[in-house]
Structures are given as C-alpha cells and as structure tokens.
Image (spheres, helix red, strand yellow):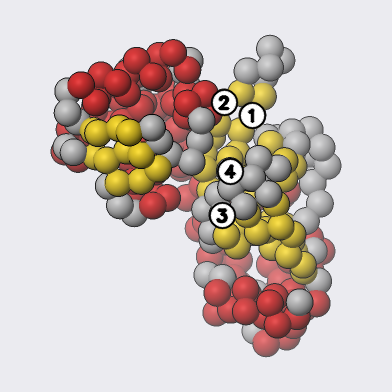
C-alpha cells in the first residue's frame, strides 16, 4: 500500500510544492478508498472528516432539496479536491457526492493537511487558486441556471463533458438522462426533447449515450448566448 500511495502522491498536481518532510507526513496519514459505480462518498449534512482527492474515476457533486429534487453542481475527474468549501467553512458537508463509475479517492488526514497549509506558503497559494477557480465555476453555474434558456444550458453541459472531462468531441455520457437533466437544471422530459432537437438540426449525433459534436461552433454560440 505504501508503494501505491507513494506512486499516487507523485502523480498529484500538488506533490511538487511539498517538502520531503511534508511528503512523508501526508504519506503516513493518508489512505486510498475504492468506490464502486453509484456508491455514496459522502452525504449532505453529515460531518466532514478527511480531505478527499479524486485519484481516478468521476464523481457527481449534488445538493438535495426538501422536496427530494436534486441539483447537480459538477462532475469532477481526477486531480480534483472534493468539497473543500464545506471542509474549511463548516463541520457539515453542504452537498452530497457519489461515484459515477469505479472511483479511487485519496483520503488525507485533516490535521496533517492543515499543518502543511500553515507552514508551506507556495502550497497554500496554489490551494487558494484552486478554491478560487472552483468558486468562480460555481458562480458561473448559478448565473447559467438562472439566466440561460434551456438550449444554452444543455449546450453548456455538452461542452463541459467535451472540454473539461474527456477533451474530445466524441464521448459517451456517463450519466442517466435524469442526472443530465439535473446538471442542466431541467426535467428529464425537457432535456430529452431539447437534445433530440440538437440531433435533428445536425448539431450533434446521438446513439444511445454516445454523442458526437458535429458543429462545435453552434454549440459554443448556444452556450455563450444562452
């Protein structure tokens, strides 16, 4: 396990910002947890514990309301920290997270992580930049949900998977239609109707979950103008 942890730490984006002593501290106070597809990683309103870093797989971050409806904030891939806003801002998770597929999470002891933040300025600065980037993304997501029309929101979801998750214009949606609708802030029926309109207009091709962007320019215009 130590060899596996050592390999995983060397592949993280923050490894190069740590001193040898700090690397040893994290190595001794971390472990890897494997989650199967659809497993719950943490639930909304439960106590925060470890710092969680996505090693592999995809993680859905979402928030549930009193009427049992959910709003998906993002799909996170490897190299992402999970819910640092909750961990540093409160002692309860403000959202939930579940594995989209087979996923490995690096669990880092909270106290050890905080010690390194306090003593390593370069690491702290990079972490602040990451938190700021996450905050800007959430702000833009909320603006999109409130101000964009449905075609713009769905085009944004397509671009998110294309550019942020898979880095290519042909991919398989890893989510159900209902989950994709949650990500776009709409109903399953409206999502299906709109994405079929994209298909009929030859903006995309769609075969089951396999989507290919045929007109990237139109998708970008729809996403930007809403």
In space, the residues marked 1 and 3 are separated at their CA atoms by 20 Å
Q: Are marks 1 and 2 in contact (CB under 8 Å)?
A: yes
Task: Please state the horizontal and vertical placement of residue 110, each as a whole percent of the image.
Answer: 79, 60
CA gap, disc 3 and disc 2: 21 Å
**Disc 1 to disc 2, C-alpha distance:** 5 Å
> Label 1: which residue?
63
Residue 57 badge? 3
The numbered dot on residue 71 is 2
**Residue 100: image tag:** 4
Q: Residue at x 16, y 37 (%)?
A: 215
Q: Position of residue 13 (x, y in %)?
A: 52, 70
Quadrant where the image shows the N terminus: bottom right
Q: Position of residue 14 (x, y in %)?
A: 56, 71
Query: Which one is earlier in the sequence, the residue at label 1 or at label 2?
Result: 1
Contact? badges 4 and 1 (CB < 8 Å): no
Mark 1 vs 3: CB contact within 8 A: no
Q: Is residue 75 above or below residue 222?
A: below
Alpha carbons under labels 4 and 1: distance apart = 15 Å
Which is more N-terminal, label 2 or label 4? Answer: 2
């Amino acid at each position: 396990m130590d060899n596996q942890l050592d390999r995983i730490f060397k592949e993280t984006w923050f490894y190069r910002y740590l001193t040898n002593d700090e690397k040893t501290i994290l190595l001794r106070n971390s472990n890897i947890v494997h989650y199967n597809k659809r497993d719950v990683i943490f639930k909304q309103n439960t106590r925060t514990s470890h710092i969680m870093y996505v090693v592999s797989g995809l993680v859905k971050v979402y928030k549930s309301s009193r009427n049992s409806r959910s709003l998906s904030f993002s799909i996170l891939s490897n190299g992402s920290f999970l819910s640092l806003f909750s961990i540093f801002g409160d002692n309860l998770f403000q959202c939930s997270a579940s594995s989209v597929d087979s996923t490995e999470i690096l669990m880092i002891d909270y106290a050890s992580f905080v010690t390194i933040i306090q003593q390593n300025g370069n690491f702290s600065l990079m972490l602040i930049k990451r938190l700021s980037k996450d905050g800007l993304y959430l702000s833009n997501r909320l603006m999109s949900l409130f101000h964009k029309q449905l075609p713009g929101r769905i085009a944004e979801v397509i671009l998110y998977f294309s550019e942020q998750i898979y880095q290519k214009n042909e991919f398989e949606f890893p989510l159900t239609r209902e989950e994709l609708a949650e990500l776009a802030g709409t109903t399953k029926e409206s999502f299906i109707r709109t994405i079929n309109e994209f298909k009929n207009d030859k903006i995309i091709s769609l075969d089951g979950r396999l989507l290919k962007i045929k007109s990237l320019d139109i998708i970008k215009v729809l996403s930007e103008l809403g």
